Image (tube, coloured by chain):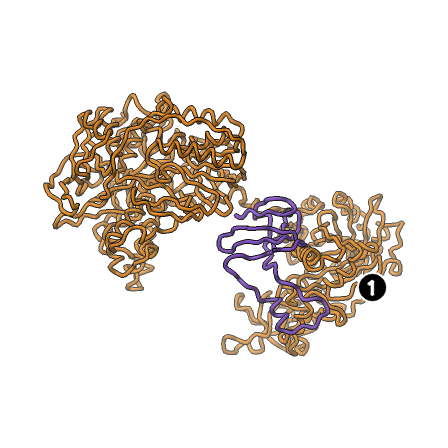
Amino acid sequence: MLYIFCPHCGSRSQNEFAYGGDATVKRPELNKEISDQEWNNFVYLRKSPRGKHLELWHHISGCRQWIKVERDTSTHEIFKTYKADELTE
Amino acid sequence: MSQDFRLDNIGMVNRKKKISFTFNGKKYFGYEGDTIASALIANGVHLVGRSFKYHRPRGFFGVGVDEPYAILQLERNNERDPNIRATEQEIFEGLEVKSVNCWPSVNFDIGAINNFLKMFFPAGFYYKTFMWPPSFWYKIYEPFIRMAAGFGEASIKHDKERYEHKYEYCDLLITGSGPSGLASAYAAAKNGARVILAEDKPRYGGSLLSSDVNIGNQTGAEWSEKIITELKSMSNVIVKNRSQVFGYYDHNMLVMSERISDHLPKTQKYLPKQRLWYIRAKEVLISSGSIERPLVFGNNDTPGVMLSSAAKEYIKVYGVLVGKKPLIFTNNDSGYETAIEFKKNGVNPLILDTRKEPSSDIITEAKNLGIEIKYSYVVVAAKGYKKVKSADIAKISDNKKDLSNIENIECDCICVSGFWTPSIHLASQSGNKSEFNEKIDAFIPKKSKQKENTIGSANGKFTLEETINEAFNKGYEVSNKITENNNKVSIPTVVEKKSSEHDKFWCVPLPKGKSYKRFLDFQNDVAVTDIELALREGFRSIEHVKRYTTLGMATDQGKTSNLNGLQLVSDIENKVVPQVGHTTFRPPYTPVSIGAIVGREVGKHSKPTRKSPMHEWHEKNNAVFVDAGVWLRPRYYKQGNETLFEASKREAKNVRKNVGVCDVTTLGKIDVKGPDAAEFLNRVYTNAWLKLPVGKARYGVMLREDGIVMDDGTTTRISENHYHMTTTTAQAANVLSHLEYYLQLVWPELNVNVVSTTEQWAGAAIAGPNSRALLMKLFPNTDVSNEALPFMGYKEADLFGIPAKIYRISFSGELAYEVNVESDYGNFMWEKIIEVGKEFQIQAYGTEALSTLRIEMGHVAGSELDGRTIPHDTSLEGLVSKKKDFIGKRSLSRSAFTKPDREKIVGVVPLDKTTSIPEGSYIVKDPKAKLPNPKLGHVSASCWSVEYDNPFSLAIIKDGKNMIGQKLFAMSPLKNKTIPVEIVSSHYVDPEGKRVRA
Ligand SMILES: [Zn+2]
């Protein structure tokens, strides 16, 4: 079980969190004309990298904040965690 | 019965307390502190079971977790506990155990015929033997395998024992209380670290309990007693015996199984049987020691052949002799230590040493004691069926290939030592890739992937001095990283006998013309010939060889067999062991009971049960409950002998005719507050929200980004910047996470806060033509007329002194209101409604009637919003704004969602007006069409329409809009029904919605 550092609460067990997928996906702006392809990429297409991955976790049984976690998908090493509005490196 | 093999003046069992137990129905005595193994051996019992494949007699091989043979079944109070290792289970008064894998008895076992049919059980027999002829499988092979397989029989009854879970955090977890565990725990604890020291056995000290050594002028046993006493007294230390750390998981999470009352005669009511500890450790020191390696020779599985270290521990710890005419077969000095203990206790051993001319302190001591030693000698084969009676021994040539001078000598046990294998399981589980150490012919941990270090003999340090020094230093070093106390304790001096180098020889060749079975894996009956066959058949990777032969795949995880198996593969392949590599170790290190893993989350504790504040009233009024998510909701209120069908019909009818009240507390509720709340709702919902006035509610539908309907519900504008959102019971948690996602990550510029208020409000839906009249009596000071409180209106009012909120919304399609009060007043509100409602013929109604009411009105719910439908499919497209953007809107223009014959919701009525249509039925044009019959759609929900008194269903079918009026068929292959039906509008009752606005 992972041990995730929540920037709001401190280190907490994985079972307090829900996984939220790729944190680098950006939702297209509202009211903007976009192609089927672009929209399809946003809704369905995700990379599944082996290695470093910036992902979202939701601290649902804690502060209820969405946070960004930089994790190695093969070793589970967590390099850094960020608040939702914090700039990532 | 006298204990012929018990020594008088040695051992740690409590001689003052005699304990009786039964084994296979026969009564035996032992002492407090005995294991089943030590007590049986003391009584001269060595035959305890039959082997897995060939049903060969099985005795004892080890003295702890490494035991591959003595797997028994414990029985108490008609409960069965399989897979119990006799070497670990302590005896208690009244303990009953029996053998497994033998029928009809351990002494006469029919399955032993397998031993003579061994041509049917070669490597890979699972894949080969039983394949042909196919007709033999069910009748002959399978019943036979089933009877022959397994290590006991699990109880099929409910396990009444209590199991617990515990979460713990520490600076340093130390796994094993041998010399390295004790020393490192002491050094770390004295340096202020929070330490957990776990020991799988009842006694602390590990090898110190049976070694002839001195630490700081005390015997090993005295020193360990002193250290453990001091550790127990320290507030920063948790010391646990009978506790096995069996799994090393991510981020230094380790799991430990504590046997709390397995060794006690009768569990106290609230004393758990076992406790599972989830331990998050900043650092881990693995001090799990090492396990002696067997030597391989003919019939080396005969009862009486055992590890020499085990024989020594039986003498030193339990005061038990494993035999009175022992043969010691060794390739290193450890066998001598065992021989010396035999000799000191009045028994004359014979040592066979594979080495030519070794010399060391220990060997000299053995010689001085007058112990007979034969060098360059081996055991060729053990003789005897149920117990060793003699052994064929022989001189072995210098190149270890040829045997000479074969003779038979009498003996009653053969104690083997093939040197030591570090227990690297936990290190391996942590991700540490081990490396082969040529000096000890075994793998040791290499580079840590997590915060762990392996110390002592688990790290290949086989002298006590090295071990103690390494452990004190590591204990200090690791703890100081955390505490920075710089408090270093002095390392005691160690006195031990020097030993000489071991011999790499491990497998005795077969003499000419003999074909003795030489076993590698004692639990799965894997012999040298099996590995040879697997390699001949082309299996190369050690992982494949393992699976094909089942080497190391038994419950003992190959603790005694892995390395010998690897050696054999390397020898045949002319490789060295590191080239072959070793198989992966996975948790658990030792078997863990399912009960311990599940803990207390069983039966009704498997998930939380949520009850509304009105739950007691429902119970008192004969409610029959149904699970709705984690909630319990009344399904119907039973009157007399009513069935579900009769009761729900009565309740629903009464809503249509008079007035009913339904507990809607379980609906999800979310407060949405902030200056940008309206804008936010406008983006979340498909319809327009910017112009909703204060004091008004609106029905809304929200989508996922892929265009699928996520949830629906009404949201009310309580004040300028405050909205009260409702969600379905099932989606409440998902909707909150969804809203938080958009507020925190996508549109952080919106000034809005959301919080769940589901549990803060108790809700009652009052529905039916009499509902306004009832409301007027409930709220005499509030104007609830159609003008003052119109459909979708909202008012705050006073309910007999309690502040209440009235929402004029309707799920039943009738004139209806939902009244909310703070949860604590829920029951008060409910009882007032029932009391005042009497004169209007009020009746409480449950979820079944609620379903009936909404289905015949064509209102959609979870069975239509099933994660596959878009607004169009459920006739909610009128709520989709064309002017503004919202979550998921772009997806709605995808071609699949806009094709003209897209599925749409319809009503379905059976032509005979009497046959109910099973939910899930397919709608088809031709019931006799060739399979697979092209289906138009499926029936999502069915009810008995109380308005028309005939069955009515909702279905989502292709081109539904144009199907109305068509005669089709509903088919349910599950219920074997084909029903002719007519397709009608989904709004079966009051299609214009007049009643809700009345
Ligand atoms: Zn948090």
Question: Eyeballing the image, is B27 above or below B112?
Answer: above
Q: Nearer the viewer, residue B503 or B692?
A: B503
Q: Position of residue B502 (x, y in %)?
A: 25, 39
Q: Nearer the viewer, residue B956 or B404?
A: B404
> What kind of residue is marked 1?
Lys
Residue depicted at x 39% and y 30%: B205
Question: Eyeballing the image, is B921 above or below B230?
Answer: below
For this orientation, the residue located farthest to the left is B405
Q: Nearer the viewer, residue B3 or B737?
A: B737
> Would you say residue B916 is visible in this rendering?
no
Which chain does tag 1 point to? B
Indicate if the residue with disc 1 has its beta carbon within 8 Å of ligand 1. Answer: no
Q: Position of residue B313 (x, y in %)?
A: 31, 31
Which chain's colour is purple?
A
Q: Position of residue B890 (x, y in %)?
A: 68, 70
Quarter of the image where the C terminus of chain B is located: bottom right
Q: Position of residue B722 (x, y in %)?
A: 80, 54
Rendered hue of chain B is: orange
